Amino acid sequence: MSKTTKKKTTKRKTSKKKWTRVDGRKPDELRPIHIESGVIPNADGSAYIEMGRNKIIAGVYGPREMHPKRFSKPNMGILRCRYHMAPFSVDPRRSPAPSRRDKEISMVMTDAIEPALFLERYPRSVIDVFVEIIEADGGTRCASINAAAVALADAGIPMKDLVSSCASGKYEGNLILDLGDYEDKNGESDVPVAYLPKNDQVTLLQMEGIMTQDETEKCIELAIEGCKQIYEIQKEALKKKYGMVEATEETEEAPEEEEPVEEAEEE
Amino acid sequence: MSKTTKKKTTKRKTSKKKWTRVDGRKPDELRPIHIESGVIPNADGSAYIEMGRNKIIAGVYGPREMHPKRFSKPNMGILRCRYHMAPFSVDPRRSPAPSRRDKEISMVMTDAIEPALFLERYPRSVIDVFVEIIEADGGTRCASINAAAVALADAGIPMKDLVSSCASGKYEGNLILDLGDYEDKNGESDVPVAYLPKNDQVTLLQMEGIMTQDETEKCIELAIEGCKQIYEIQKEALKKKYGMVEATEETEEAPEEEEPVEEAEEE
Amino acid sequence: MSKTTKKKTTKRKTSKKKWTRVDGRKPDELRPIHIESGVIPNADGSAYIEMGRNKIIAGVYGPREMHPKRFSKPNMGILRCRYHMAPFSVDPRRSPAPSRRDKEISMVMTDAIEPALFLERYPRSVIDVFVEIIEADGGTRCASINAAAVALADAGIPMKDLVSSCASGKYEGNLILDLGDYEDKNGESDVPVAYLPKNDQVTLLQMEGIMTQDETEKCIELAIEGCKQIYEIQKEALKKKYGMVEATEETEEAPEEEEPVEEAEEE
Amino acid sequence: MSNNIVSRLKRKKIVDVVATGKRMDGRELLQYRDLEIKTNFLAKSEGSAEVKLGKTHVVVGVKIGIGHPFEDTPDAGVMMVNAEYTPVAHPTWEPGPPPKDAIELARVVDRGLRAAEIIDMSKLGLISGVKVQMIFVDLYVLNYDGNLIDACSAGALAALTTTEAPEYKVSKKGEIKKTDKTEKLKLRAHPLAVTVCKIGDSLIVDPTYDEEEVKDGRITITVDENGNLNAIQKRGPVGFTLDEIKKCINIASEKSAEIKAIALAGE
Amino acid sequence: MSNNIVSRLKRKKIVDVVATGKRMDGRELLQYRDLEIKTNFLAKSEGSAEVKLGKTHVVVGVKIGIGHPFEDTPDAGVMMVNAEYTPVAHPTWEPGPPPKDAIELARVVDRGLRAAEIIDMSKLGLISGVKVQMIFVDLYVLNYDGNLIDACSAGALAALTTTEAPEYKVSKKGEIKKTDKTEKLKLRAHPLAVTVCKIGDSLIVDPTYDEEEVKDGRITITVDENGNLNAIQKRGPVGFTLDEIKKCINIASEKSAEIKAIALAGE
Amino acid sequence: MSNNIVSRLKRKKIVDVVATGKRMDGRELLQYRDLEIKTNFLAKSEGSAEVKLGKTHVVVGVKIGIGHPFEDTPDAGVMMVNAEYTPVAHPTWEPGPPPKDAIELARVVDRGLRAAEIIDMSKLGLISGVKVQMIFVDLYVLNYDGNLIDACSAGALAALTTTEAPEYKVSKKGEIKKTDKTEKLKLRAHPLAVTVCKIGDSLIVDPTYDEEEVKDGRITITVDENGNLNAIQKRGPVGFTLDEIKKCINIASEKSAEIKAIALAGE
């Protein structure tokens, strides 16, 4: 968290034509993505994603009873995401204890995914989404959200929509999509985005670096385009397993809100 | 806690007349004190004190329900003081985690203040006194008690008396009142005292250093005189706010003790 | 835990005759053992053991109510052993916080002792066995089990049998009994064993080092012989206190198992 | 009434008022509360700022010290931003390790400073790979009435702007001495965070505690003195449309200049 | 039905089947489930192995780095084995510090490697008393269906066998540089753990989760490529006769060769 | 009957007996229980003492080692006093981090030693700013029946008095070697703590557990061999009059000489 400044100041190239990305991709090209669902037999739902060299596994448990009970809500369920990096996922090895970064990412991931769920259907319950980063290659939080969304669908949890996530950023003066590790560490900025395609809503948005207002807005738009491509890959992954595209389709009307019949338990 | 010896052995001066304190004070002179109540809007009561260059804020919450319940007492309330130093209050910076010293001072502060309260009136409840040292300049525990007493009065909590606190000690062979940072670190001894003026009782007494029995007793007497002066300043601070001196006056008769109707809950 | 390799590879001596142990003992000779029961007045039962230069104290509390209740079992009691080394028990000083080694030994000790008890008689209860290593001299876990068994008997807790424990190992190519500190650290292997003499059952078995299958089996047999000798010393220690050898004699028939009338409480 | 119903009623009331373009306290939607910043008020900190934003009250201390570099940047100084939710600041805040929200607060403020490359850390090495200067920025909350990120961001900027950094000398033998000389810490940028909240269909700035409680989401945008963006952080279990995001960025760009003028007044 | 009755019924069923010489899943008593091991699948780890044993799924990462030697072995490298029970792996596993069983898992695998002197740690010093090479072996459980020790032991052996160790250079000034050269980590032995479970009167290998739940006890035996034993660990609240122990050793000797062939296939 | 009533009855009984000038166990008010101190009984500690004061039983271990100096005293050794409430010592003591009372115990004993400047820490440097000698004083409670401060203070004095300190040699290359030579640790003072309890209107020394439970307050006074005071610690939620304090000091001065004779017998 507290290392020295990560982003290099812009060194704008004069001739843009010759510029290519370190891995040869076009500016708006995603890294190869592979998603597989149902990879953890014990979990209610799960998914494995490779996005570039990221290797990430997500497992869903729930809806289930919340422990300790005093943290449950009487009129709705709680979504709890946990982002965690394996000690060997980065170089040098990191401690297995959750870092402050892990905790913050867990929070923004939860915010990114929650709008896709019908939590009001699960009073007093919790849905746990556990994400383990087996190998990290830039953009782990986005890849984690992509895996988590597929894992939730795999768990049969009704969703308003899948959540798709992708970063954009600026590198050597160019706006690019889906930064790899090297671009992430040496570029001018990084803009992770999560997106609900059906609602056209951004549910994760962070940014770090130095960019003009205009560049920032272009980056967000670029990331949204990336999310739309990922959305198709996610659906494909679910289709492969369940033989249907619209597995997660559901009415978006929230059920009528009622007064909760019981009060929250005090503890 | 575990640094090397703090007190220098006595170097008694032969001619006492020329001796003056590092900041020019007379041996029995207090540092300038400024107390202000009602400084934390969210707290039930609060006070800010400057005593020399000490800058300390105290907030009172309660009487309120005790959590966890199993630590509450069926027939009386609990006073819980927490003394805590901000990381930037000392040089070099300290960790924000409570130190063993913080924990000990919290205990002796609680003992110092409790005799002034009618805790038997608040069965199953807790009164929390939180003290934050913003800047430390010697004698923080005494200044904290002074602020806490005003904060309790500001919270409208009936008190048998205000508690007033002040240290004395020995420096270059002289007994002096209200040691500043330099005197505290370089003197021969340090005797923090808290005092209930109406009851003529000492409720905090600690000492560290090397002194004869006679010197020690003289120090305690000197500190008590300091407390009496501080008492007037505390009353003035409350008067300013409430326009009355005897805001905290109350009968000292404890209410008749009754058998508690309910037993303590087991958990 | 994580120091470099502890066991030296076998340097088999050509002429075995002249070989003697560092402390002059015969290969199958125990170190001097002294056991005393009833040494902790507050405990329900206790024992102090010296085994070589090991100095270990064991105290038993219970059967008593389990806290927190949710860890109790509705149909049987729980045995909880805690092995802990004093900071000054080893050189250099260790931290008083329980190490991973402490935790593992606590588990295998519990397994070693549990088969001697009638835990089904104490539903919802716990028997706590706390062992403190005052000085460590090789074989602390075995000495701890010996002290714990006597402490349990001293607490009047019915036992199927005492548990006796002793290590064997290989040192300079020779199989030896009851390794001292030096032999433990410099030998080729170490085999701690606990044994129920009446049942002829091994309840603790660990091994670390390099030995053939045959040597290992011989070591276990040698350790069992050691346990049998210690058994007599344990009985003697109890006899001294209670004037009877068979203090712990009890029918081994387990009481008929009944359906528990109450379910486990949920928490 | 359950807390649940209370908060639903509270939400309705606030949303209704905000929908009319006003606030409960009479402010405009895009109007900050009164902001007072006092700098350099702590003698033992190299930099300090006290911020009062309405009833929100925070102290920021900047301490400079000596520490170890990270392995991969042996010559770069280290900046640490830490936030403390003191228990005096709110009735629901308890003593203990920083809650998740305090971690996010520290990280969002940190990210703004770091991304703007506010300090040239490469100038803060002392002995390559062994010792470097440390800059600790402690955000200390004394009363919480909403909008901590903006208050702390302004406080951090004000405190850093007025920080007097000590000069260190390294002797040939590798001894580091703090000289009596100080000079103003050189800042390369003036990043400041502005948080925009979404309540119903409206966007507001500088939320109170009550407004934060009922808000749908928030976006914090850190803007430097040239109008470049340095950091964005979206929170809350809702999505934002691209259009809403652009509005937020516009608001933040405008407001950051206004607040920055106050934060830099002490420079 | 209480969990208690459920597990008693489950136990009866499994014991009955095992008594007939078969398993619930149709295996022979001494038959392992399908074992798949993939090595070198992580780019950021010096060594890695993914193990699937039936539904049990673990990843082992080997990382080599630089650290401090122990005081008593200033020139020896340090190996650390750590196990992580990730919350994705089982519905009852929760985020948090490693439970006792995870500590035992790490220690048993560690003991086998260490006792076999698998790596010559004395070759891994860099600057005497100051810096040495560290070898971290992280056992990461992704799905738990029994027999973690054997799966992790095989994974650790497979990962270490295929580890490419970086070459370090120490300059005259004491700077340590990682060169681009790597060479295969030299292993001096191939220890592998086999766990034998006792269920009723039968001995089985490779227990599933259900079989582990109802087992009476287990003995884990680590055997090297010459048939020598390196480590034994008995667990469970029951005793084993000497005869049973000998049978366990025989089974382990035989099975370890079989499993080792698979673990070493990637070499 | 609730614990509350029990303790009220207990208190009444003890207060009544004490008021007659006697104790429940027949002692005089100012009479200690039998005190036995055995020194030098641990081979692996540089100093040790076993203290039995009535049924209170503590072991004090003194270990000397090598560690890092504090930044502001680069040439001074470091003394650490630590207290451990082992769970064997009392039915209400649980395994875990030291409770507040154990922290106070350590700090009060520490303060007496430190204020008396018992050891010349300036003589314990090894390599300026890098390595110094550490003196660990561990207070280990094995049975708790009141008056731990006095028992531990006597034990610490007895253990330090008989400590054989190793001689260290520092080579030109900066290697530190422990030689075989030892010499008695040089003590410059003999401070000893005496605790006086107030029960009703009476002052007593050496309280049992029951007496401590019902006491109103206590004052601990550490007195050196010349009758100088080194430390005072008042505890308990009551005040003391100046007159009472003077009586306590007189009692402590007298008793400390008596107890010191026993503590120093091993010298």
Image (cartoon, coloured by chain):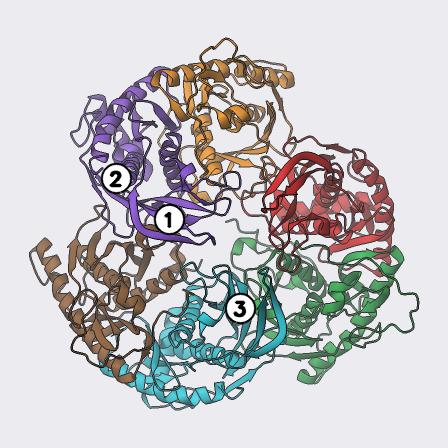
Chain colours: A brown, B green, C orange, D cyan, E purple, F red
Identify the residue under disc 2: E145
**Pointer 2 with pointer 1, Cβ within 8 A:** no
Q: Which residue position is annotated with label 1?
A: E168
Q: Specify the quadrant of the image occupied by residue B19.
A: bottom right
Identified by mark 2, the residue type is Asp
Q: Residue at x 24, y 55 (%)?
A: A56
Q: Residue D159: percent from the left, percent from the top?
A: 52, 79
Q: Amino acid at mark 3?
A: Thr
Mark 2 or mark 1: which is in front?
A: 1
- SS class, disc 3: loop
* Co-location on one chain, circles 2 and 1: yes
Residue projecting furthest to the left: A243
Q: CA distance from mark 2 to mark 1?
A: 40 Å
Report x, y in % for residue B59. Answer: 60, 71
Left or right for E132, reference E194: right
Q: Is residue D251 visible?
A: yes
